[in-house]
Amino acid sequence: MRQTFEHELEELFQDILYMGGLVKKTIQKAVNSLKKHDLEGAQEVIDKDDIIDDLELKIEEKCMSLIARQQPMAKDLRRIGTALKMITDLERIADHSTDIARITLRIGDEPHIKPLVDIPRLAEIAQEMVNKALEAFVQEDVNLAYEVCNLDDDVDQLNNQIFRELLTYMLEDTKNIKQATQLLFVSSSLERIGDHATNLGEWLIYMVTGKRKELND
């Protein structure tokens, strides 16, 4: 029974890593599409969101089946509970990527009011946070989970910097307001992705230690 449980748990974790890989790609593709005015790429991000939604439901069903059949206790139960929480955060990250893709479609071929440098950088940090959180999950590495929190501070600072800069553009020329507002939404979505990645780290810490840690200020 124990061997069967461990095998099923390993399959469950592999599903989560696969989902995490898809989610990371949505962040990159959404922001690259924005930067390059790639409307087809943006639409692809939107279209593939259903795949991630379906995967979340599939993993959720596996978790509930494991609980019902195996009746796990202590850390085993925390591992399954952590899986349920993590897929929720991963799905929401994908939703934010989809929001960015929709903004890309709204902007269309309209020239950017400024070169997009900080937003792609923000996306890179957000991707790194998701990657570290997933790596911490695989290795059950609490220290790596705390590193995710440190990166969230960088995300917040860069998001604030982008806000101030775009606000300046809006004040200088009212024609910039419409696009600058959309770019603010993009930055905010990336900041929220950072928050969800931090949640992933928090759940890993809970899984390993049995204690809940609030890593977001």
Image (spheres, rainbow, N blue to C red):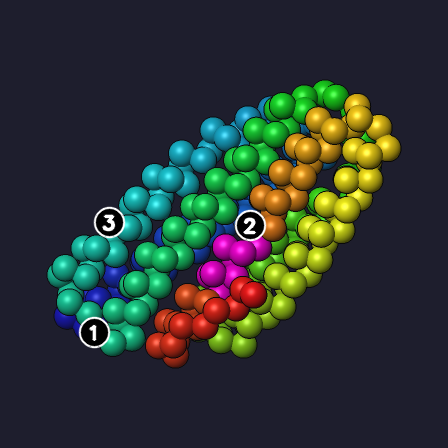
Q: Residue at x 65, y 44 (%)?
A: 187
Q: Residues within 10 Å of mark 1 (few under 14, many from 20)?
A: few
Q: Vertically, is 166 above or below 161?
A: above
Circle 1/circle 2 CB separation < 8 Å: no
Residue tagged by mark 3? 61
User: Is residue 127 visible to us here?
Assistant: no
Residue tagged by mark 2? 192
User: Is residue 46 visible to us here?
Assistant: yes
Identify which amino acid the numbered label 1 is placed on.
Met
- Left or right of residue 80: residue 104: right
Q: Residues within 10 Å of mark 2 (few under 14, many from 20)?
A: some
**Residue 163 location (% of width, % of height):** 73, 45
**Quarter residue 188 falls in:** top right
Task: Report the magenta stretch's main SS.
Answer: helix
**Residue 110 location (% of width, % of height):** 75, 21
Work out how far the residue at label 3 is from the one at label 1, CA to CA, in angstroms.
Answer: 19 Å
**Residue 169 location (% of width, % of height):** 82, 35
Mark 2 or 3 closer to N-term?
3
Q: Residue at x 57, y 29 (%)?
A: 102
Residue 30 painted magenta: no
Mark 1 or 2 closer to N-term?
1
| Label at residue 28 | none
Identify which amino acid the numbered label 2 is placed on.
Arg
Mark 3 or 1 closer to N-term?
3
Name the quarter where the C terminus is drawn: bottom right
* Residue stretch rendered in magenta on the structure: 194-201
Front position among marks 1 and 2: 2
Q: Residues within 10 Å of mark 3 (few under 14, many from 20)?
A: few
Q: Nearer the viewer, residue 100 or 216?
A: 216
Residue tagged by mark 1? 73
